[in-house]
Image: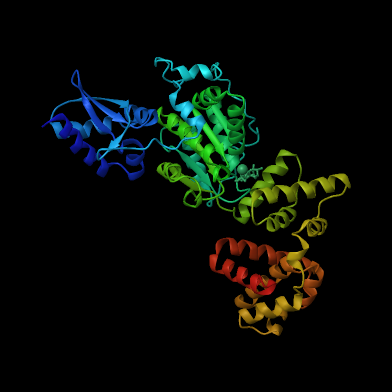
Amino acid sequence: MEPQQAWQVAYSQLQLQLDRASFDTWLRGASFIGVEDGIYVIGVRNPYARDMLQHRLYRNVRRVLMDVLGSPVELRFEVRQMEINGKKLPPREEMPLFKLLAEQPSSYNENEVVQPLYEQVARPQRAVLPESELNPRFTFERFVVNNSNRLTYEAARAVAENPARYYNPFLIYGGVGLGKTHLLQAIAHVCRAKGLRVLYIPSEAFTNDLVDSIRHKTTAMFRDRYRSVDVLLVDDVQFMAGKESTQEEFFHTFNALYTFNKQIILASDRPPRELVTLEDRLRSRFEGGLSVDVQPLEFESRVAILEMWARERELTLAPDVMNVIAQRAQNNVRELEGLFNQVVTKAHLEHRTLTVETVATDLERYERPRQHRREVTLPQVIEAVAAHFRLTVDDLTGKGRSTRINQARQVAMLIARELTDTPLTQIGDAFGGRSHTTVLHGCNKMTEEIDQDPTLRETLAQLKVALRGH
Ligand code: ADP
Ligand code: MG
């Protein structure tokens, strides 16, 4: 078989074997140039594709070509102007920076001929990594693990123990305040302790750095800096959405690192498929590694975190007090942290002991903005809940203790607590003269139950929407 033909066959087989994003990014348009000293020379679109094929995909491509030829073969990839079906591909639309970068020799290939353009930008000096501050508190030891986040935690540990081995890129996504930054930095701590070059950077800082380097004509240094690390952690990548030049540069950084088997770790507050404005190819790369999510923590984990914080500050908190705080902060750990700090600081300033009552009162004040609690009244809550559970108002506020009545009553108490201004004692009064601790207990119990029971959680959410009117 003619070499040219053999390459054509191999090329079409690779199209079937590789995932589409990889094929499109690295191989599409790769053309046979010739055989030199028995080596197949293949032209590719840009230096990134060349590096990728030469390093990461080499064995793949070689095997396919060998199968076609039936004999051993070696390949070499060179950057050439591409043609598809006889048509020259238009040069890719690139920002000036990237044109410049594409023509500069890269730091990891120092033997390359120095191109004239190289002289026009500031000479790259030894890359100095900005010693990005890591929060010493964000360690694996201080990360409370529970059912809702165990897998994520374990995946993060695996990445930290064996960077670039298992999951690359590794993406952690999920809502605000659920521990993404904490996990990213925990990985960074472990890798740094191993002596690896680790760079942790929020994506806005990456963008700013890029803009600065363009302004000060230090793009070569910029490029060196980010490409000389063993582990790159970029936080809050959702902020890159819509910023094309940042994405473009990040994509190249990403490829350079990936090609040389360095670990890339990202955090985003949106799942990869929702990073809609990120370029497709960037997105498909995210999906090529492992994406794991962080979920809101269950009640017990929130309490466990409070216990840890109290221990660290050598405070003793009554279990009831921790329950009240944990019950209030349902959405995320940052909220939990805020409430904990406020309560503790206040108690400290006023030299008083923390009791359930004082804490509950303190928390009332910090509660959600007023407008969320506006017109909803206690009788409205009771009626709505009674109707929903097909009970009468008397059932709900009476002495009955059947499971269904009890559950409905706790739902009503929790909603009253969240949507109205009514103090606990008055809520207790409305429910047949129950004490405020009973109300508190009911609310706690319900909070735990909705953690476990999605149907109940849905019921609660619907009732709240119905009551608030939005
Ligand atoms: P995100 O980056 O997801 O917005 P952070 O990582 O900044 O959230 O977490 C917010 C706060 O909550 C931090 O103080 C962090 O230490 C703490 N935190 C979050 N999840 C946990 C957890 N599972 N165990 C202990 N602390 C946690
Ligand atoms: Mg964060």
Give the image quadrant in which the ligand numbered 2 is located: top right
Whether residue 284 sits left or right of residue 7 in the image: it is: right
Whether residue 84 sits left or right of residue 118 in the image: it is: left
Work out whether residue 203 or residue 429 is closer to the camera in this orientation and state it.
203
Whether residue 312 sits left or right of residue 66 in the image: it is: right
Count the labels in the image: 0
Residue lying at 80% horizontally and 75% vertically, measured from the top left: 429
Percent x, y of residue 193 = 55, 25
Percent x, y of residue 302 = 64, 51
- In the rendered view, tell whether residue 17 sits above or below residue 231: below
Residue lying at 65% horizontally and 30% vertically, measured from the top left: 133
**Quadrant showing the N terminus:** top left
Farthest residue, direction right: 350
Percent x, y of residue 438 = 74, 68
Whether residue 103 sits left or right of residue 413 in the image: it is: left
Residue lying at 62% horizontally and 39% vertically, measured from the top left: 142
Instruction: Report whether residue 341 is seen.
Output: yes
**Quadrant showing the C terminus:** bottom right
